[in-house]
Image (cartoon, rainbow, N blue to C red):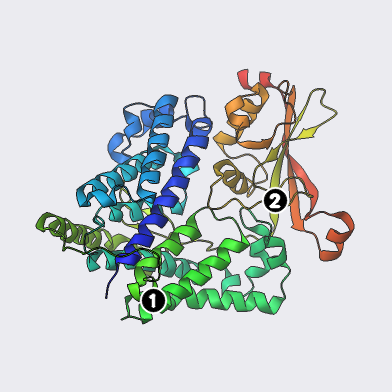
Amino acid sequence: MAYWYSRFVFERALAALYLVAFLVAANQFVPLLGERGLLPVSRFTQSVPFRASPSLFYLSHSDTAFRVCAWVGVALAVLTLIGWPQQRGSVVAAVVWASMWLLYLSFVNVGQTFYGFGWETLLLESGFLAIFLGGWTTQPSMWLVWMYRWLLFRVMFGAGLIKIRGDSCWRDLTCLNYYYETQPIPNSLSWYFHWLPAGVHKAGVAINHVVELIVPFGYFAPQPLASIAGFLTMGFQGMLIVSGNLSWLNWLTLALCVPALDDRFLSWLPMTAPALQEPDVIHRGAIYLLAAIVGVLSIAPTLNMLSPRQVMNTSFEPLHIVNTYGAFGSITRTRYEIVIEGSDDSSTWREYEFKGKPGDPARVAPQIAPYHLRLDWLMWFAAFSPRPQDEWFIALLQRLLQGDAATLSLLKTNPFPDHAPRYLRARYYRYWFTTADERRQTGRWWNRELASEYVRPITLEAFSQ
C-alpha cells in the first residue's frame, strides 16, 4: 500500500498544530511563567536539575529568550506547513522537525502545572517521530506508519480503559448527562448537546466505548479495515470538537488517524506524487533504531494500560518520546466557577471576565480550540476546591492588584482600565445551563448562585505582610 498522500496530509496537520502551540507560547508563556510570571521559570530551574527536566531555558530564562524561542517555533512551523523543508530533502526536513521538537520540549519541561496536559506530551511524541518521516521524494516508511498507529492506539485505548475502570457513570451510560455542562470550557454548541434526550446521551456513551475499546484494534488490521477504523475515529473526534473546547487534543488525535489511511482515500488531492526513492542506508538505520527505542520505551506505558491502577497522561522519561494517555476517567456532576471581582471602595464590585471560561451568564460560550487558554483551564481545576490551593492563584490576585499589563492580557476584560483596583475578592459560584424556556425569557446561557466566598476582600498590602 502507498502512503505518500497520507504523509503529505499528516505533516501539514502536525505543522499546523505546532503553529498553534508556539503561538500559545508566544502569547501566554511570559505572563504565566516569565520573569514576573505567576510561576517563574527561574524558581523552577533552581530547584529541579536539568537531567530531570531538560530544557534550553536552563541556559537562559529571560523573557527575551522565551519570546525568541516561541517566534522561532512559529516560523519553523509555517515553513513546514508550506512544505519548504520537505522539498529540500530528508536531512533538512529532519533538522527542522527536530528543532521544533526541541523548542517545544523546552517549554513543556519548565512549564510546570500550566503545561501539565496530556496533549503536550502527545504533540512531543508525534513531533519526535516526524523527525524520521523523510523528504518530499522519500518513500514513506511502513515502520513509521506502524509507530504512529501504535501511538493512536495508546491514545484511544488508554482513554477507553481509564473510563471503563473509573467513574460509574461510564458503566451505567449516564456520563453525558453531565459532561457537556461540566467540561473544562464549553463552546457555543455545548448547551444544545446538553439538552439532547437522555437516550441520545446513553447511546453516545455506548458509542464512546466502542470507538475507544474496540475500534483501535482495527488500526493494525489489513487495508481497507485500518482505514475504516481511522475514519470511525475521525468521526468520533469530530463530534468532540464541535461539542466543546479540549485544546488541540481532538485535533491532534484526528491528525494521527491519517497514517491509518492509505493513498486510495487521499489521491484525489490536487497534487501529483513525485518519483519516490527508498530511504538511504543511514535513514533506514535511524528508523530501525527508532523502532527499537519505541519498543523498549513502550513497556512502561503498556504495563500502565494493563494495570488496574492505571494513571493517565504520564511520561515515563524526560524527553516525552513514548507516553501514556487517557482522559475524563471521572466526570464532575456539578460545575463551580471562581469569579474574581475588584473594587475601589469595597462596596461596588466589578467582575473580571476570562476569555474562555464561563463568567457572565448571558455571554455565549466561545469556540477556542484548538487554541489553548492555559489560565482558563487552571481556573477550572482550581474550582474543584472551595478554597484556594494553588500558588499561582495567589500570584494572579497580586498581579491584578498591581494592574500588571502582562497578566491582564490573559483576560477578556479589565474593568479597571485606568488604574488598578484597591480591593480584590474571589467568589465561588455554582453554574448550570438554563433550560430552553429560561433562555428564551432571559437571554442567559447559564444560571448561577453564590456558594461561598473563595477569597475575602484583600488589598495589595496583604502581600507584603
Q: Quadrant of the N terminus?
A: bottom left
Which one is nearer the viewer's eye here, 389 or 38?
Answer: 38
Up-down relation of residue 9 to residue 370 (above or below): below
Q: Confirm whether residue 457 shows in the render.
A: no
Residue at 79 percent across and 51 percent down: it is 448
Residue at 39 percent across and 51 percent down: it is 15
Q: How many marks?
A: 2
Binning the other alpha carbons within 10 Å of mark 2 as few (below 14), some (14 to 19) or many (20 upward) gives many
Residue at 54 percent across and 62 percent down: it is 328
Residue 431, position as x, y percentages in the image: 74, 53
Which one is nearer the viewer's eye here, 459 or 11?
Answer: 11
Residue 36, position as x, y percentages in the image: 51, 25
Which residue lies under the disc numbered 2?
336
Q: Amino acid at mark 1?
A: Ser
Regarding mark 2 in the picture, which secondary structure is present there? strand
Residue located farthest toward the right when viewing the structure as drawn: 441
The quarter of the picture where residue 341 lies is: top right
Relative to 62, 418 lies left or right: right
In whole angstroms, how far apart are the C-alphas of marks 2 and 1? 41 Å
Residue 175, position as x, y percentages in the image: 62, 69
Q: Amino acid at mark 2?
A: Tyr
The quarter of the picture where residue 349 lies is: top right
| Mark 2 in CB contact with mark 1 (< 8 angstroms) | no
Residue located farthest toward the left when viewing the structure as drawn: 281
Which residue lies under the disc numbered 1?
227
Which one is nearer the viewer's eye here, 316 or 213?
Answer: 213
Q: Quadrant of the C terminus?
A: top right
Residue at 37 percent across and 30 percent down: it is 45
Residue 85, position as x, y percentages in the image: 29, 47
Regarding mark 1 in the picture, which secondary structure is present there? helix
